[in-house]
Image (cartoon, grey):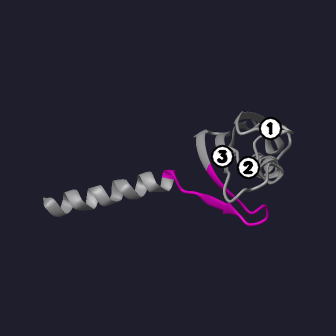
Amino acid sequence: MKILLVVLFIFSGAVSAAEQEVNYDFDHKVHYKQKRLAPGHYQIEALQKEKTRFSQLATFLLRHAYKLCGSYDFELKILSGVEQFDDRQMSPNYIQPSLSANLVCPKK
């Protein structure tokens, strides 16, 4: 009985770890998390690591949305992480948050 409980505990930990898996895009050099909310609906978070430039995060987000949807008719709603033009000048030590968005692909 104890062995069965241990196996179930290990399995449930592996499943929850898979949901929080961090992926890496080699082309844009961006770490990201992706969660499927429903068919054709995703939540994508481009992670801010080691001072990744905002332009890299934004470009990755657009190209990844195209890759997931297969066309440019997608709807991308930014949730957080947009950088202002003067953020670096006003607060040079400010740690920019990750860029997160909801993606809705067009119905086929």
Q: Residue at x 73, y 49 (%)?
A: 68
Q: Is residue 53 left or right of residue 19?
A: right
Q: Which residues are magenta?
A: 19-33
Residue 24: mark: none
Q: What residue is pinned by disc 2?
A: 68
> How far is disc 1 from disc 2 in space, using C-alphas?
9 Å
Dot 1 or dot 3: first in sequence order is 3
Instruction: For the N terminus, give its image quadrant.
Output: bottom left
Dot 1 or dot 2: first in sequence order is 2
For badge 1, the amino acid type reads Phe
What x and y, as percent, mark residue 87? 80, 40
What x and y, as percent, mark residue 106? 77, 36
Q: What residue is pinned by disc 1?
A: 74
Residue 45: mark: 3
> How far is disc 1 from disc 3 in space, using C-alphas?
17 Å
Q: Is residue 60 left or right of residue 36?
A: right
Dot 2 or dot 3: first in sequence order is 3
Q: Quadrant of residue 17?
A: bottom left
Q: Which is in the foreground here, disc 2 or disc 3?
A: 3
What x and y, as percent, mark residue 20? 51, 52
Q: Quadrant of residue 81?
A: top right
Along the viewing direction, whichever of 28 and 10 lies nearer the viewer: 28
Mark 3 falls on what kind of element? strand
The answer to the question of whether label 1 and label 2 lie on touching residues, with beta carbons closer than 8 A, is: yes
Mark 1 falls on what kind of element? loop
For badge 3, the amino acid type reads Glu
Instruction: For the C terminus, give its image quadrant.
Output: top right
User: Compared to 13, does 73 lie above or below?
Assistant: above
What x and y, as percent, mark residue 37? 58, 38
Mark 2 falls on what kind of element? helix
